Structures are given as C-alpha cells and as structure tokens.
Image (cartoon, rainbow, N blue to C red):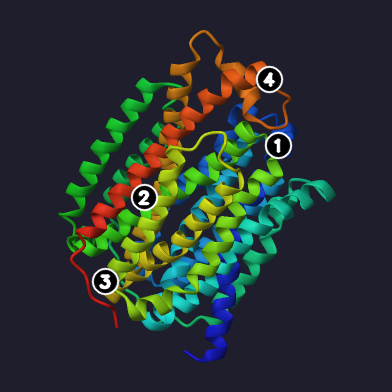
Amino acid sequence: MKNKARNWIMIAIFIATFMTSVEITIVTTALPSIISELHGLAYQSWIMSTYLLTTAITTPIYGKLADSWGRKRVFQIGVILFTLGSFLSGLSPSILFLILARALQGLGAGSIIPLTFTIIADMYSFQKRAKIMAFNNTAWGLSALLGPLLGGFLVDTLSWHWVFFVNVPLGVLIFLVITFKYTETLTVKTGLLIDWYGICWLSISLISLLIGIQKIDANIWLAAILFIISLLSCFLLIKQEKHVSDPLIPFKIFKNPTFSIQVITSTLLSGILIGYQIYFPIWLQSLYRVPATISGLVVTSSSVMWLFASFLVGGLLKRFSPKNIILTVVSIQFLAYLALLFINSSFPYWGFYIIAAISGFGMGIVISINIMLSQHLVSKKLLGSATAIITLGRTLGQTLMIGVYGAVLNLFLRFQLHDVKFAAINRFISSTNQVNTHYQKIFAPIILNSLHAVFGVVNLLFVIILLLNILDPNKKIIR
C-alpha cells in the first residue's frame, strides 16, 4: 500500500476513533436537556446502556465477518449504521425513538471500534504498531477532553439534537475515504457459512447479562434469573462453537494461555477504569465539597497521562518482555489504589488527581500491550476475531463492574444508615447542595466507609491481574 493512501486511511481511522469515543462524553453532557424535552427521566439509563448493549453484542460478530468478508466491507457497514443512527437520534421526537436510534448507533460502533485496531494491525508491523496506536489514542484522549466542552457548547448555542447531528458529516467523510483509498489485502471468502445458532446464543447471553447487571439494585430475583439464563446460553454457545466448521468465536485461540491472560487483564483493567471515573468525582464532591467541574478534572488528568504513556510502549517493548512490563506497571497502580483503603478526611484532595494520573499512565501502557500482544499471538486469518474479543472484554469489563460497584456502594450505605432514610443521603452526594454541620458529621463517615468498600473490590481486581500475569509462561522480549 502506498504511503499516501495509508496516510488517508489513518486519518479516517483517527476520525472514526474520535467519533465513536466522543459519543459517550458528548451525550452525557446533553442528557439533562434530552430528558427534559422528551420527558424521559424514567428511561434515561437506557439512552446510554442501549448503545453499549448493541455494541457489545455485535463486536464479536463483526470480528468474525471481517475475517471472512474482509475489513473494508464490514467497516463500511459499521460507518453507515453509526451515521444513520446518529442522524435518526438527532431527529428523535420521543424517548423511545431515541433509544431505538441509539441501538442502531451501537450496531455501527460494534464494527468501527474493533476494526480500527484490526486495520492498523494489517497495515503495520508489530514494531511500528505501537507508535501508530499511540497516535490513534490521541483521538480517544481528545474526545475525553473536548467531548464535555463540545457537548455543552452545542446544547447552549443550538440544541441537544446537534450533539448527534455533528457525527453525520464525520461519518460521510470516513465512508468516502475508506471507499476510495482503502484497498482490501485480505482474501475474501466466497462461501461464508453464517453461524446463526452461535449468534443467537451469544446475543441471549450478553443481553441477559447486561440487563441483569442493570437490575441488581431494583430487583435482585429478576437479576438472578437473567444471570442463570446468561450462563446457560454461554454454555450452549461453547457447545455450539465446538461442532461448527466456521465458528463465530474460535475458542481454539484461548488455548494459548498468554492470549487468554491478555484478554482477562484488559477486561479487569477496564472495570478498574470505570471505577475511578465514576467514584473519584463522587468522593471529591461528597466528602470534600469540590465543585462538579473541578471534580471532573480528575478524569482529565488520567486521560492526559494515558496519551503520554501510550507513546512509550514501543520503546518499552524493545527492551523488556510484556510480562515484566505489565507486572511492574500494575504493581505501581496497585500500591496507589491500596492507599485509598486507609485514607480519611485529612487526606489532601489533590492526591486523587495524582492517583488518577498514575492509573491513566498504567492503563495507557498495559491496555496497549494487551491489544498488540493478542493480535501478535494469532494467525492473520483470526486477527479480526482476536481484536473483537479483546474489545468485547473491555466493554463487558466496564459494564459488569458498573453494576458490581453500584451494588457494593448501596449495600454498605444501607447497612450503615439504620433509621435514616436513603433519600436523605442523595442530597449530600452532590456538592451543589448546601449541607449543615450536623448532617456532615452523620453522612461523611458512612460515605467514606462505603467508598472504601468499592475500592476494596478494585484492589481485589488488581490482585487477580497480578496473579494471572505471574502465571503467564511468555517471558521473552518480542522481536
């Protein structure tokens, strides 16, 4: 492939990465306006979770199709669906219409997100890939920084509809560049047998799991039933995939222990990532009474360090084995988070920004290595499936742990409240509400203990990651 065409493709991938990642931060800013105009308070969580749900379900399906139909066609399908979903979301006259349009957006994102990594792996060698992925990560970093600002500007100057419309010209541009500049390098199969049963069991398993997570607090028995359905469907999926000639998920790639460890590491780290993104601002607002805008900067410090660290990955891999890099970096992250279990109100609030920066720095190194190593360990014909599996793991890690953290927090809050109504603590959580000294003395230790419990779970995840990577048999530097 000529350098000029390759540069055009990288621009398209950069824009695609920005477009799909900014979707979350920009929509979050517009949610109050959307809920108010469409009268959708009762369904507000589904505006985000529906997008996440359809993205998770379709990610492995697109990964398989990309290995069979080729990257170009599947990527084009994803861009079309995402762009159409964005356009329809902007036109939404009701909350139900918006939720369905968001589901269509997610169907497109399920293709775009993993295939950006797959196309990079197709075009660049392992040695050059770290630098290119670091460049592409800047799109993710920019979305984290600019998303809330752009969303606020569009809502204030135009309307919430433009939060979605802004994706339409980007989608058209990406489609045109891929159509005219990208030449398919993969040999496309002519007689593809679609594993419909595999798609069915995978969809039921993921839908049951993700909805079950959403229902943990509201209805524990319904959540338990959904978890059982998810496990049963997962069992039937594995059984199905062992007996088909062209499986949706080629489970044979999990026979390589290093590959499996990379997937699990990335999944658990993504669960840790969503933990500090949600609960650091809550900690700062509720216990330090820091304004919402200032508390949100704790996530920004993480994003900046993630970007910086991703540019170091290539140099580190030339000198050290992936196993030693991961163990060292995760150990440093673990020590930083371990401190959270012992701090009290005398701990300076700027310490959270330092912990978030350390966390972001580690994520930028380890998750980049997870993706690169998992791609390196499989054959060319399974590259799309392998990338889709690790992308799915990252999505599931965040979604599952949102539910777990929420359940742990609520459990510890209710256990300590006794005769105090749960609604009373809701006002205390936000720094915008004035709280008298009496309530401060009552609620502060209750929230502190509950947050300690949440980050106790986070530290447990770090221990699991360290133990898994100690068991990794691959100790060599990759050349």
Where is residue 281? Give x, y as percent. Answer: 60, 41
Discs 4/3, front: 4
Residue beneath the point at 59% across and 31% down: 43
State which mark lies toward you, 1 or 2. Answer: 2
- Please determine whether, in this image, residue 464 is positioned above or below residue 456: below
Upstream in the sequence, badge 1 or badge 3? 1
Marker disc for residue 437 = 4
- Left of 318 or right of it: where is 275? right
Above-or-below relation of 311 to 111: below
**Label 1 neighbour load within 10 Å: few <14, some 14-19, many 20+:** some
Secondary structure under tag 1 reads helix
| Residue contact between numbered discs 1 and 2, judged by CB atoms under 8 Å | no
Residue 44 showing in the rendered view: yes
Q: Position of residue 266 (x, y in %)?
A: 37, 56
> Nearer the N terminus, badge 1 or badge 2?
1
Of the image marks 4 and 2, the number of the one nearer the N terminus = 2
Instruction: Name which residue lies at 58% across and 81% down.
Output: 8
Judged from the image, the secondary structure of the residue bearing numbered disc 4 is helix
Q: Would you name the residue on which mark 3 appears?
A: 377
Circle 2 residues within 10 Å: few <14, some 14–19, many ≥20: many
Identified by mark 1, the residue type is: Pro
